[in-house]
Amino acid sequence: MEISLAIKDELRRFCESFAEERIFRIRNSIDSINDSLKSETKSSAGDKHETGRAMIQLEREKLGHQLYEAEKMRQILAGISTADNPAKVVQGSLVVTADSAYYISISAGAFKKGSTQIYCVSALSPIGKILLGKSEGQCFDFNQKTICIKKIL
């Protein structure tokens, strides 16, 4: 797997797009819920009305928490510099191992380009926590397998 420094900008855009799309979807859901809440206010069916309002408000709270988390993703990405090429794994590092590659940023899934696949993972994910602070050539155990870092970009 040949991965160069040039792909880091694409990874950044992939993660930014993931976060922005998520924020957009959540905001649309919140708008829809607010519309439902307004129409539920116009109804006056007693207990059924109160139960409906409570369910809508719970859903709005859940979406509010999801929006907060998505906004945090955007903040994390804003703090990542793609110009750095550190000796140790930090937020924004692209870590290449013998059989996988990881972009330490946000949990955005797999980025695919041709035959290359890079996992965009949070520094708080299990693999992210293990990778942080490691250097090229260092090995670690993950999922009952020993993995060695070939390159940090």
Image (spheres, rainbow, N blue to C red):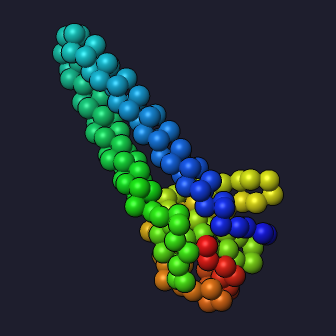
Which residue corresponds to the image point at 75% horizontal and 78% vertical from the top-left? Answer: 98
In front of the other: 18 or 85: 85
Residue 29, placed above or below residue 92: above
Residue 107 position, x and y percent, is: 52, 58
Can the viewer see residue 130 in this picture? Answer: no
In front of the other: 97 or 140: 97
- Say whether residue 90 is left or right of residue 110: left
Can the viewer see residue 97 in this picture? Answer: yes
Kindly indicate the quadrant of the structure image that contains residue 38.
top left
In front of the other: 19 or 4: 4
- Say whether residue 4 is left or right of residue 132: right
Residue 13 position, x and y percent, is: 56, 50
Please tell me how many numbered marks the rendered image carries.
0
Which residue corresponds to the image point at 80% horizontal and 53% vertical from the top-left? Answer: 114
Residue 41 position, x and y percent, is: 21, 15
Image quarter where the N terminus lies is bottom right
Which residue corresponds to the image point at 48% horizontal and 75% vertical from the top-left? Answer: 90
- Say whether residue 42 is left or right of residue 149: left
Residue 35, placed above or below residue 134: above
Which residue corresponds to the image point at 73% horizontal and 67% vertical from the top-left? Answer: 3
Kindly indicate the quadrant of the structure image that contains residue 99.
bottom right
